[in-house]
Structures are given as structure tokens and as C-alpha cells.
Amino acid sequence: MSKNSNQSAKKTTSRRDFIKKGSSLLVAGGVVGSSLNFARAAHAYGSDTIKIGLVGCGGRGTGAAVQAMNTTGGEVKLVAMADAFGDRLQTSFRSIKGKHGEKVDVPEDRKFIGFDGYKSVLESDAELVILATPPGFRPLHFEAAVKAGKNVFMEKPVAVDPAGVNRVLAANEIALEQNLAVAVGLQRRHEVRYKEIIGKLQDGAIGNIILSRAYWNGGGVWVRPRNDQQTELEYQMRNWYYFNWLCGDHITEQHIHNLDVINWLMDGYPVEAQGQGGREVRKGKDFGQIYDHHMIEYTYENGSRMVSQCRHIKGCWNSVSEHAHGSAGHADISGGKIYDTQGNMVWQTKGAGDGHQQEHHDLFEVLRKGERPNEAEYGAKSSMTAILGRMATYSGQVVKWDDALKSNISLANVDMMTSYDEEAPVKSDANGGYPVPVPGEFKPLGEKKA
Ligand SMILES: NC(=O)c1ccc[n+]([C@@H]2O[C@H](COP(=O)([O-])OP(=O)(O)OC[C@H]3O[C@@H](n4cnc5c(N)ncnc54)[C@H](O)[C@@H]3O)[C@@H](O)[C@H]2O)c1
């Protein structure tokens, strides 16, 4: 990985080679698409219109589509949308149309509802797809998007279990070979304040990094209460935050941002983790199976440690931030400040800005130049960092990176889902509660394989 964030963009391959390779992949992947997709994927768009599709039309998918259409240098047009639920799709459609009416070309027959909707978006002539469902579906959708020859912007996390991480890494090999752009919604990597300070710290501004700290401590997130008309599978899908096969616990869903900043700083990934966590206030059947706090000590290959905390409990100390301590000073990374060993501030960033918007400016700018960035490897490995932490807190054991990844544990077989009448991957007990992992009893490498 390059020192500063993104892997370097690869220049385009020959157009003819690309179409040839692309066609065989389409057949192998069983995804119906047109060779036009591959041809356009290798194309320097210049000021041409870039067509996009959206899979997962919730808060972030809607936001990402709007941010893509806010970019300059040429038009970005939304041509197809898919969501598991019609109500979510229509709300998103209205919201996007309200902001970018003239750039929305999604008639009723290009709005796709249900588990298979993503396949229809991939069959459309969208050249880039935004994947923004709950992360449990991301490996399936990413793999299919790559096989269909689409450029991708996918939200973080990119997986919720080791099998998903392996699947994303494998699909990314094809994306690299086919010169497809893959952007991941870890927007801090595109913010000036972060790029500046990580560069300075990697250049030795505080000496060797001995310890780092990462926090996502806050009050928690939404609960979507059960409705009597819902099947169990629909309930879990609507209340996805609380089920690990969909969300991966809040350490994976939110704290990944802070863990990724430290991985970026360290230019690597932890080799092991141990920690503790539990459910102090998040009790009862409305909260599925996730914890409300995790605290983890990660170890990097060079012996440097990261202390990580994430909490969803109201009325406590809140902080969403990253910090580093070195032999010659310390840094408030998120605050963009560097201090010497006496505590004097010796540098402060002037950078600011909206990472969510910036990552789309950066992506569309390079697409128009004919370059294809690839952020999937750090997206997958920072997702794995969070999953490793979860395995450590759920079990109370030391869990090693290589063992966890090799386990290829999968929390659900989402490929096979077609209807809400099917059995949900997680079952409730007689009181309506769900199984919550107990440290000491939970086997980190022994989770049931789906
Ligand atoms: N980068 C960031 O700062 C940031 C911020 C918020 C959310 N996110 C990420 O974005 C993703 C979505 O989060 P959100 O807040 O928009 O959630 P959300 O619940 O608002 O939206 C998710 C949407 O996906 C749909 N969906 C679920 N399963 C689907 C399937 N199989 N096929 C098609 N659609 C499906 C849901 O119906 C819903 O409309 C998550 O991975 C989340 O972590 C990232």
C-alpha cells in the first residue's frame, strides 16, 4: 500500500483486450450485461455523462448518489435503483429527484425491489454502481458488480465476517485485472486534515509510534420496532443494525472509521487482538444480539499497540477520534494537531472539508481522466480489523489475524435469500430475545459455518 492512502491508479488497458476479457467474465459470472459496460469501464470519460446505479436506497445510498451527482467536470446521471423494500426506494427516489431532478432518469421499470434487485441494476447500462445496503450483502453485491464489469463505489464496512472479507479480496483481484475503479466509503482518507497529518506522522514528526488510541464512543443509533405484519426475516432486515449477519456489530459498522485511520498511519494491519465488552444497557428483544461496548488492545507486527474503545451508552464520555503517541511527541490525529514531548503544540492543520463529498469529487475526477483507483484492499482489511476485535471481545480470547481470516467463518448464506418468508439466520428464544455472545463461552474460531 502506498504511504498516503489510495493505491495508485492503474492506467487503462487496451480497449480491445478489455472487451475480450470482459465478455468471458460475463459468461463465467452468470451475470447478463452488455460488453458496453466493460468498454466504458476502460474509458476516459472526459466531460461525457457517467451513468450510475444505486443498490441500497437508504440514508447513505441516497446521500452518496446526491454527492456523485454534485461532482463537476461533466454530468452524472442516475439510471437505475434497487432496494429490498419499495417504501425505502420511493423515499430515496423522491429525495434525490428533489435535489437533482434533471439528472435522475429512473422510470418505474428501472426501479427494482427485493433480494434480486441488484442483478437488474447490474444489467442496466450504469457504468458505476453505488453499493450501500447493510454490509452483510456487500461481498455478494461487490462480486457480482465486478463480474458485470461495473466501476464501484461501496460503503464501508465491506463485510461482516472472515468469509466476506476473503470474498471481497478475491473479487478485487478481478477488479484490478479488469481495471475497474473500486472506491470505499472510508472518507477520512480523502480529507485534507487527515492526509496532511498522517503524512507528517509517517515522515517521523513524533518519532516511532509506540501507542495509538481510537474511539467511537457515543449514545447509540436508531431502533426500528417490530411490526406485526413482518416476517422474522423482514424484521431483521429492517432492524439490521442489531443483527451480526447484517451489521457485524457497531464495532464493524462505525468504529471501522477510526481503526482504519490507525491502520493507515501504521501502513499495516494488527496481527492479533484481545479485549472485553458486553451489553450493559442494551437489553431486551428490540436490540438483537450486538454489544453496547467493546474495548480492545490490538498489536501490530512491529509491536506497536492500538487501544480501541467503542460504546453506545448515553450519559457517558463521548469521543469520535484518533490519537498517536511516539518517542518524540504525540498527535491528536482527528483534531489535526501535533505536540512535542513537553506538550507544546508544534503544528496544526488548516484543512477542513466534507469527506463524504470529497471522496466523490476525487473518484469522478480520476474516472474522467481514465484512471481507476482501487481502495478495496484497505477497505477489506480494515473491515477485518473490526471483525477481529469483535471476535476478541465476544470470546475474551487472544485472536490472531491469520487464524481468523483462515477460519473463513460465515454468519449467513445471503446468496440463497429470495423471499421474506424464508427462515432468518438468527432465531429468537421463547421470550423473543436473541442469542448474545458470552465471553469465556463463545469460541472465536468456532462460530457456526453457514
Ligand atoms: N461512510 C459513512 O460515513 C457512512 C455513514 C452511514 C452509513 N454508512 C454505511 O452505509 C451502509 C448503509 O447504511 P444506511 O445508514 O444508509 O442504512 P439504511 O438502513 O438507511 O439503508 C440501507 C438500505 O439498504 C436496503 N437493503 C437492505 N438489504 C438489501 C438488499 N439485499 N438489496 C437491496 N437493498 C437492501 C434497505 O432496505 C435500506 O433502504 C452501511 O454499510 C453503513 O455502514 C456509511
Image (tube, rainbow, N blue to C red):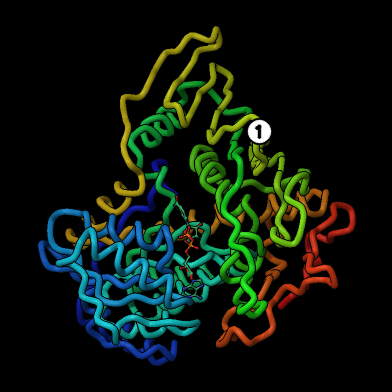
Q: Secondary structure at mark 1?
A: loop
Residue 270's place in the image compared with 119, above or below, is above
Among all residues in the image, which is located at the extreme front? Answer: 228
Please say if 366 is above or below 49.
above
Quickly name the residue at label 1. Answer: 315
Q: Residue at x 73, y 50 (%)?
A: 282
Image quadrant assignment for residue 95: bottom left
**Picture residue at 40% right of the left edge, 47% below the top:** 187
Question: Residue 136 versus residue 388: which sits nearer the camera?
Answer: 136
Left-right relation of 64 to 273: left
Residue situated in front as seen by the camera: 53 or 193? 53
- Callout 1 amino acid: Gly
**Residue 145: x, y in percent?**
40, 76
Quarter of the figure with residue 61: bottom left
Q: In the rendered picture of this protein, how many numbered marks are placed on residues? A: 1
Percent position (x, y) of residue 422?
A: 65, 86
Residue located farthest toward the left when viewing the structure as drawn: 47
Along the horizontal axis of the image, is 427 left or right of 170? right
Question: Residue sitting at 25 percent across and 83 percent down?
Answer: 19
Q: Nearer the viewer, residue 334 or 37?
A: 334
Q: Is residue 393 left or right of residue 33?
A: right
The location of residue 83, given as percent across then percent down, is 43, 75
